[in-house]
Image (cartoon, rainbow, N blue to C red):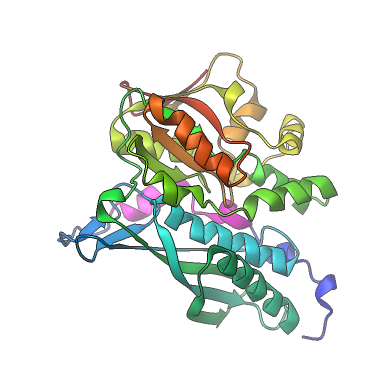
Amino acid sequence: MNAPTELVRLTQFSHGGGCGCKIAPAVLTEILAQAPARAVPQALLVGIESSDDAAVYKLNDSQAIVATTDFFTPIVDDPYDFGRIAATNAISDIYAMGAQPLFALAVVGMPLEKLPVDAIQRILAGGEAVCAAAGIPIAGGHSIDVLEPIYGLVALGLVHPDRVKRNDRAQPGDALVLGKPLGVGILSAALKKGELSPAGYAEMLQWTTKLNTPGARLADLDGVHALTDVTGFGLAGHLLEICRGSKLGATVRFGDVPLIPEAQAWAERGVATGASGRNWAGYGKEVALPAGFPEWKRKLLTDPQTSGGLLVACAPGAVDAVLAEFRRDGFDAARRIGEMTADGPRVTVV
């Protein structure tokens, strides 16, 4: 318990970091297949039926509460940065429903015999800093002694019932807009090898600690039909959730997809997370790739994103307004990457 914080590498305790430690899509589907069907109250506007980002419960004609939880093992070694990333990722699910966050509860699991107290304090301080930036308090939580460090939040928010943005309401012809570049999982893999450059680490932090604040304002745009955030299942996986729920297909122009430059360089050298392969094994049959499509590009499409960008399906005429909301909050990498199609559910990459 007396080891200096700087000598403790958080990722040494993790079998898989960040959203890369999510249960693989195919395994999760099998686990949930036998879940008993129960009567759903009418006030529950969003539940488990569409694999959406959060639950939504209508309180009255003008308010619905949005509730989610997200936590994971370390994706970086610095405790403060780990806390910031985990908190940003958890709050993202509130924005992905078009809601404003209200408050959060901390979920804390720490190997007390292995981590110094000041390291744990710094993890919590990182989470507190992000919540302060989001304008919300951490109002409580729960902690346990476990073998791997785990940190995250239960996050709650508010939204008007008519402004909830689900992931299953896309329409044929909708444009697809992605708010953040891909590649966080690949950067984390390079970091774990001890080979990520300081510039690559800085860019990784830039995106993983950037709150998806445009989501709450996107809910006010009538042309926005569906909204989600890209996390552990990668761009292809979360776009497939939109396709399945909306009973549509999607076309993605890979050349228009924003990428983190250093992540692309590592991908071209064959670096990827194990979760990327598990993602492809789980849903690859529903993704059509062009002949000769390089493996490194495929790995970027299935790369698990921790605190990834918002993915928006909107009317073509709303694209400029959507991009303006992203630019307003400094999401300069936001791009239109494709369209929803009538043939599906599947994703076609061109």
Q: Residue at x 43, y 57 (%)?
A: 94
Residue drawn 52% across and 21% down? 289
Whether residue 281 appears in this view of the structure is yes
Highlighted magenta segment, given as a residue range: 17-34
Foreground residue among 167 and 51? 167
- Where is residue 230? Give x, y as percent: 51, 44
Name of the residue lying farthest toward the bottom: 2
The answer to which image quadrant residue 187 occupies is: top right
Whether 63 is drawn above or below 98: the answer is below
Q: In this view, does 277 lie to the left or right of 120?
A: left
* Residue 279 seen in this snapshot: no
Q: In which quadrant will I find the N terminus? A: bottom right
**As rendered, which of 350 and 115 lies closer to the eye?**
350
Q: Is residue 201 above or below residue 223?
A: below
Q: Which residue is drawn at 77% across and 50% down?
A: 201
330 magenta-colored = no
The residue at the far top in this view is: 291
Q: Is residue 32 magenta?
A: yes
Q: Where is residue 73 in the image (x, y as percent from the top left)?
A: 61, 63
